[in-house]
Every structure is written in structure tokens, then in C-alpha cells.
Image: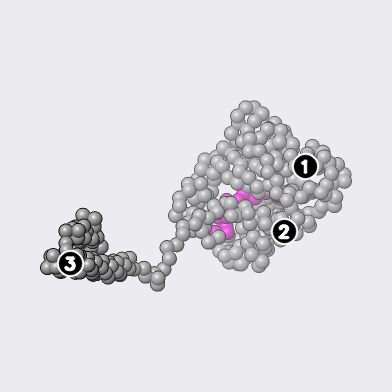
Amino acid sequence: MREKLEALRDEALAKIAAAEDVKALQEVRVAYLGKKGPITEVLRGMGKLSAEERPIIGQMANDVRDAIKEQVEAKEAVLEGAAIEAQLASESIDVTLPGRPVQAGSSHPLTAVIEEVEDAFIGLGFSVAEGPEVETDYYNFEALNLPKDHPARDMQDSFYFTEELLLRTHTSPVQARTMEKHKGKGPVKVICPGKVFRRDDDDATHSHQFMQIEGLFVDENVRMSDLKGVLEAFAKSFFGPDRKIRLRPSFFPFTEPSVEVDVSCGMCGGEGCRICKQSGWIEVLGAGMIHPRVLEMSGFDSSRYSGFAFGMGVERLAMLKYDIDDIRHFYTNDVRFLKQFNRM
Ligand SMILES: [Zn+2]
């Protein structure tokens, strides 16, 4: 019996030493120390021994069991430590590597330009008004001094749903609607950004859909010098503090007098270059004093109130500011084009 226990112990310890992983070690533990293992069997057979032998063999079996248990635990600690070491080595992280950048989107350049223009005019006391894109003939034309037979309607051919309903050709109807809401009482001081539509053949500078921002200021004693001052402040805010403006006579049915507004060329500083076609100036918007008939049609007493209005193309502003050569870039959604505005 004694020899048998010693042989069991040596055999178990050899197997423990040979175990290469935790799983193999657990198998050894179950095989020798389990309920059906040889040591349990020895202890169970103690009844057959003599009274003198019983405590000696019992003690020895316990010693063998403890020795195996101890070795299993020691080996287990070694194997687990090695497993952690191996994992650390294979999953090492280089903390000096640069992080992966998060792809962030950005505002469309037209949206960014509209927001910038809005900021400039909000700073001058204007508020922002919006109106419907499907408009009535009355608000789009008639309320703006463009009766049905007026030849100036030819410049703004549009998409009609019915005789009386069309896609608006400019944002001016928002001005007519805003004035009407004020029921003849000033001041009215708004800018109106939005999409407009004209029947046009698309090319590098024309699009059947584009965006405008119009502005309107109606109050007592509003003069042409107020118009010039406001537009000059805007030009300096949007294009740069060194820019100047000039006014040239023009024609619009809803303003009298009407002007085209030019901004001094940013490329040559007014000396003349390829960009400004040697003139030193770049045309950016149309403006004028609101025609008395337009004021009257919108419910304002033209002997008491006066005002000015102006309108500009958002695409043209963006093309001038960011040197973009084709209006179609704004509407074809080419990510390579749009990505250039990520830092705006
Ligand atoms: Zn120039």
C-alpha cells in the first residue's frame, strides 16, 4: 500500500510537470484527486487495514493528496502567468501611433455663404424672413409693379403650375408679403434668403435653380445714402475691410431710381486685372429706392414712408469669394468639391 501511494504521487507530479496548459493541468487534477480517483479509492479501502496500519496509511494518503494539490496550484499559477504574458505580447498597443481622424461633414458652401450674409445684416439690425417657393402671380409679379403685360416679365420666365401659380423667380415676393403683414406701419427691416427658379439653359454661369438674398428697409426718411451705407458695410464685412463699392444707374420695375452695385476687385485692388476684365470693379448686386407704387400696393403711405431694396445671387457671392469657376459645382454634389469647404 505504501509503495502504491508513493508510485501514485510520483506519477501525478510527473504529469503535473509535463502539463503545458491549464486544461491539461485540470485533467491531471481530476484524474488523481477526483471522487473516482486512486487516492479516494485508497482512503475508502482503509477499513480493511489493521488498527496499527490505518493511521499511518491514512496520514500518508493525506500527505500524497496535499502534495499533488499543492503542485497543481503552483503549476496553475505559472501557466496563468504565462498566458497573460503571451496575451500582453500579442496584443501590445503602440501609444505613440497617431489617432484615427473622425470624418466630419461640413456646411454646403451656399449654406455657409447665406449664414455669413445673415450675420452681417443681423449686425446692422435686420431680421431674417422666409416665404413660399410656390408663389402666386400676384406676389411674384403684380405686387412688385409687374402687371401681366409688362415687358420686364420676359427677363424672368419661370415654371408655371397654372395661370396663377408658379415657382417664384426671385425672393421679392417675400418682401411684398412682409410689407403687407406690417399693415402700413414701419419700420420694416428684413433680409429674405431662399431658392428661386427661372426657365434657363444651364451652363457655367446659369442654373434653372439658384439662390437669392434680398433685403428691404422701409421707414420714414430712408434715403439713398442709407442704402449706400448699408451696402458698403456689408461689402466690407463679407469681402474684406479694404473693399469699396460704387453705384451705377440701372433699371428694375420695383425700384426708382435703380442701381447696379459693384465692389472693388479684390485681386488687383482696383488697378485692373483678368478677373475684373481690367475695370477694377466686380458687379455683385442690384438695388434701388422702392417704387412708390410698390409701397402703396403693400399698404404703405408713400408720402410718409420711403425705403430701399437690394438683391444678390448667393452662387455669385460664393463664386467671387472662393474663386469657383462653374455654378454647376454647387448642385452636382461631388464630394471632392464639397470637401474643400471643410475648414470654412
Ligand atoms: Zn481686378
The percent position of residue 234, horizontal first and vertical second, equals 69, 59
**Element under disc 2:** loop
Region in magenta: 309-322
Nearer to me, 177 or 18: 18
Decide: is 243 above or below 222.
Answer: below
**Element under disc 3:** helix
In the rendered image, which quarter is residue 122 located in?
bottom right
Q: Amino acid at mark 2?
A: Gly
User: Residue 312 magenta-drawn?
Assistant: yes
Q: Which residue is mark 1?
A: 179
In the rendered image, which quarter is residue 236 located in?
bottom right
**Badge nearest the viewer, 1 or 2:** 2
**Element under disc 1:** helix
| Callout 2: CB less than 8 Å from ligand 1 | no
Magenta stretch mostly in which secondary structure? helix
Task: Give me the C-alpha separation between circle 1 and circle 3.
Answer: 118 Å
In the rendered image, which quarter is residue 31 located in?
bottom left
The percent position of residue 215, horizontal first and vertical second, equals 71, 49
Task: Give me the C-alpha separation between circle 3 and circle 2.
Answer: 106 Å
Residue at 51% x, 43% y: name it: 202
The percent position of residue 267, horizontal first and vertical second, equals 57, 65
What is the quadrant of the C terminus in the image? Answer: bottom right
Please state if 63 lies on the left or on the right of 138 as rendered.
left
Which label is found at residue 123? Answer: 2
Disc 2 packing (10 Å; few <14; some 14–19; many ≥20) = few
User: Residue 320 magenta-drawn?
Assistant: yes
Classify the position of ligand 1 by quadrant: top left, top right, bottom left or bottom right.
Answer: bottom right
